Image (cartoon, helix red, strand yellow):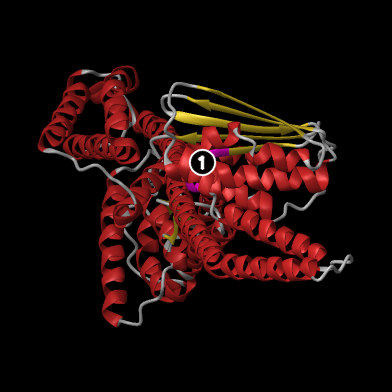
Amino acid sequence: MFSYQDNHQSAQVLAGDLPISQDANSIYKLLLWHFMVLIVACIVDRILLIQTALPLLSLQAVISYMMLVFNPTQRWSALIMLIALFAPIHLFSPPPFTSMTWTLLGQICVSIVTIIISALVTQNFLRNIDIFTLRFIHVLFSCTVGFTLLYQYMTAVATYRIDPLDLSNWQYLIDGIIGQIASIAIVINGLLMILMLKYQSMIVIPKLTTNNLMLLIISSTGILFILYFGGNLISNLSVFIVIPALWFCYRYRWWGLSSFALVINAVTMIYVMFAIIHFQTTSDLTLISQLGFSLNDMAWFLLGLNLIILYINAMIHELDTTQLSIEHSQALMVKRNDEQQLLNQQINQHNKHLINAQEFQRRKLSIELKNHMEKNIHELQQAINLLELQASLTGNGHNSFTKIKIFAHYIYMSVFELINWLKPEILERFGLIETLKSQYFADKLSLNNIAFDFSSQGDRINIPENISLVLFRITQEAINNTIKYSMADELRIRLTVLTDQIEFTIVDNGVGFDLATTEQGFGLTGMENRVKALNGSFILDSRNGTQIKMTIPLSH
């Protein structure tokens, strides 16, 4: 029926949604526990009688009501029989009834039906509300107040204590109503402690150490001392409990404050009951003269104490739940960040493998071209030269071999350029900076009427080979894109070598392109992947021309 969320799990904690055990022993144990609790409640009710011979706290009726609220309807048949067994004890003051009459049976039925209807209404109102929250406490306490008013009225009418149409008779019920509401606050506090303890595997409940148990014992002794010598219950005991209550709240949160309230409730009621048994009276005048307070004063005190503690505990729980949720979100965020970093590392590793495989294939292809194509083209050039020489000796003025020789030379230069593009021998011999300073890229750009400018800063000349190869390949791709798409007439490259990183910028003054609408091709993606494989950053700006800014750490 209700869910308690903690450590980011949802657990059905009220008996209304717990699985119904088919074991008969579990039902018998449940009835036995309820039977024992009802016996204690009846004993308290028989002792704490107000001057109208009614139970002050109506503890038996309140516990019967809570039994139904916090149990599934499948168990109600057995529980209702148990409630019916104790109902006559609550309805009549001593001496107890001696015979069962139709009138008595009707009065018992009115009492039980009132409890059942109120429990059903309360269950419906509390359905789907998270337990231990402020809203749960507010709705539950409001329902129990309504149950108190209805129960006190119906039982008073059924036992002919008041006229149902005389509104002035409500004054007759005021002490019983206040006492029953105080009893409800006490029972709710204890019941929520039981539920918290039952599901402590889902939450963190600090253990009460020996020192803290001693503090509880000292607090109990202090309460008895004040009750015996202090006189006024409200002014003395209320002040005394503030400091230890705050300490238990701070140290043990909900559990500590509820435990302290349980001690105060038990000590106060036990002390008052012993006093009533000792003085053999519940008269307000006698109790005030002997104890300094009446039963009505005690009811108001217990009501205020337990109601305040209930709402404080609910606020503490919501704060703790919020804190746990924040901590869980932070832990989840850290976990996802770690997973993202691991994924990025795996992607970088794959990129490195792909780049290395690509460079390997390029070197292999360049070697194949050099070993086979270059040799064959060279032999072809020699054969053409021989044929050209023979044709010139025969005096043939129209020598077609000259044109073939030019084509063969063009093919040879294209293959030579392709080999150097695939396996930049100049980069291996002179390094990145000298390659960029040479005419290697400038000649290629000048053929397309694009000016080339390179500048470098920094004292470090020997750039690591892997970084040099990456920047060389990016320069190749950028120059190809500039020639094909940019319509630029100038391209500039800036290289800055710092102690811990390299900054490399390529800028042209072309038309640029729109990053939002232009699909990035394999070339731009390949540039970025190469830089990220070295744990670097890649920034592309194409608003006024195209600018590529890269930063690569030297200690990657």
Name the residue nearer the viewer: 156 or 313: 313
Q: Position of residue 119 (x, y in %)?
A: 52, 60
**Residue 149 showing in the rendered view:** no
Q: Quadrant of the C terminus?
A: top left
Name the residue nearer the viewer: 385 or 547: 385
Left or right of residue 308, residue 94 in this image: left
Residue at (44%, 38%) from the top-left corner?
A: 323
Report the span colored magenta.
532-537
Residue at (62%, 56%) from the top-left corner?
A: 416
Quarter of image, res 84:
bottom left
Kindly identify the amino acid type of the residue bearing the numbered disc 1: Leu
Question: Is the residue 167 above or below the residue 14 in the image?
Answer: above
Name the residue nearer the viewer: 273 or 252: 252
Q: Residues within 10 Å of mark 1 (few under 14, many from 20)?
A: some
Magenta-colored stretch includes residue 535: yes
Left or right of residue 430, residue 222 in this image: left
Question: Is the residue 46 above or below the residue 320 in the image?
Answer: below
Q: Position of residue 141 (x, y in %)?
A: 51, 45
Magenta-colored stretch includes residue 491: no
Name, please, the residue furthest toward the right: 398
Q: Position of residue 385 (x, y in %)?
A: 70, 65
Check disc 1 and report the residue beneath it.
134
